[in-house]
Amino acid sequence: MSPSDRRVVAVIPARGGSKGVPAKNLAAVGGVPLVARAVRECLASRLVTDVVVSTDDAGIAAVARGAGAEVVQRPTAIAGDTATSEAAVLHALDTYEAAHGISAEVVLLVQCTSPFIVREDVDGVAEAVLDGGADTALTVAPFHGFVWRDAEDGTDAETEAAGDGGYGINHDKSYRPRRQDRPQDLLETGAAYGMRVEGFRAERHRFFGRTALVRTDAARVLEIDDPHDLARARALAPLLDAPRPGALPTRDDIDAVVLDFDGTQTDDKVLIDSDGRELVAVHRGDGLGIAALRRAELALLILSTEQNPVVAARARKLRVPVLHGIDRKDLALKQWCEEQGIAPERVLYVGNDVNDLPCFGLVGWPVAVAGAHDVVRGAARAVTSTPGGDGAIREIASWILGKELS
């Protein structure tokens, strides 16, 4: 975050009540709860100095704190279905400023129901107000569609002109110009807004004075209002959440690495000899990576459903504790975290198949190897470029330690 004394406070409203999608703000997209995704991008912003989540829900508060935000408890009076986002932002801003003895110059409203917001969007609206001469700003995306309205939903004059049919909003239905001959329409994305604090307090609305339009990628525009939106977001996450600078885990992000075995440290193939003994192939580079993680004083664990001597033998070779023959890996992982005194959100878990999904939902850094099941890759926060058994663990170690291992 910026070291500047010019305070830019990002407020993320995230109330607990949601009828369209129950517990919506805790729903995971790409393996990360929506509220945590918004916090992550705000924290990665160049210009944001403070990140605050306004909520009335204890579960959301816990996830927000785990992601690195401060939390302001939202009063019941402004936590219902009819409460405005502006009311939540004003309350959070006043409460946060009073608690810290600061004065913000710019306040941002960042919506965690826009799962694919990126730090560049956050910086864009902040910069437009902070240094661009705007009083307010919002993210918009190019829109080329023809908008229609039913006559019964229009004004009296519009209804009379349309008869009992539909009429065009941004076009004359009798003339269909080419896209390049039409003015460029811009769609409000709903993801991020910036307001100069003095004017926001006076007007109590997100638009006043000069409003800057901050263009963003139309492919990332999606607001989650119902279960179908959530399903689309989860399907798009593997495409839109491709690793980018700052999107991979570092040593500062985690305290432990937990590894599945088959398909993660192996290529998921098994050779069986005539006596029924099983053999698997592992990668020497993975051993190098695990040794480097141990030197970095990270807690390590191999967690496998298979009760197999080869798993135990590999764990001994790597000098890593192992729990195998486990039916409920998530329960075993939770118990291990409690015994080790490690917060689950500080754990990186590596998996490849659907039996890893419960563990993905428990940890802060679910990671899939290349070649993992499609559903697993969709639930992962990061995906390796290297397949399991071919050096994927070494690749992950290089992410964490910030250097290529040799």
Image (cartoon, helix red, strand yellow):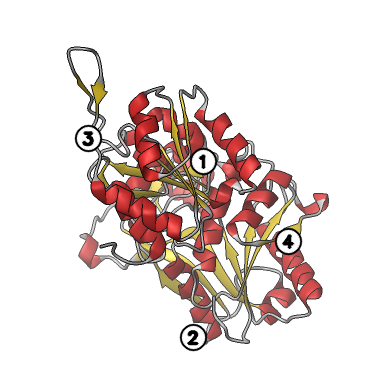
List the residue tagged with mark 1: 152
Q: Distance between the residues labelled 3 and 4?
A: 59 Å
Q: Distance between the residues labelled 1 and 3?
A: 68 Å
How crowded pointer 4 is (Cα within 10 Å; few <14, some 14-19, many 20+) is rated as: some
List the residue tagged with mark 2: 132
Label 2 SS: loop
List the residue tagged with mark 3: 281
Say whether disc 2 or disc 1 marks the residue closer to the N-terminus.
Answer: 2
Where 258 sits versus 270, above or below? below
Side of 293 relative to 66 (left or right): left
Say whether disc 3 or disc 4 marks the residue closer to the N-terminus.
Answer: 4
Residue 315, by quadrant, is: top left
Residue occupying image coordinates x 43% and y 50%: 222
Label 1 SS: helix
Q: Could you tell me if residue 59 is visible in this image?
A: yes
**213 or 376, nearer to the observer:** 376
Most extreme residue toward the left is: 274
At label 1, the amino acid type is Glu
How crowded pointer 1 is (Cα within 10 Å; few <14, some 14-19, many 20+) is rated as: some
Say whether disc 2 or disc 4 marks the residue closer to the N-terminus.
Answer: 4
Label 3 SS: loop
Where 196 sits versus 337, above or below? below
At label 2, the amino acid type is Gly
Is there CB contact under 8 Å for labels 3 and 4? Answer: no
| Mark 2 vs mark 1: in front | 2
**238 or 382, nearer to the observer:** 382
- The picture places residue 55, in percent across and down from the top left corner, at 71, 53
Say whether disc 1 or disc 3 marks the residue closer to the N-terminus.
Answer: 1
Side of 138 relative to 343 (left or right): left
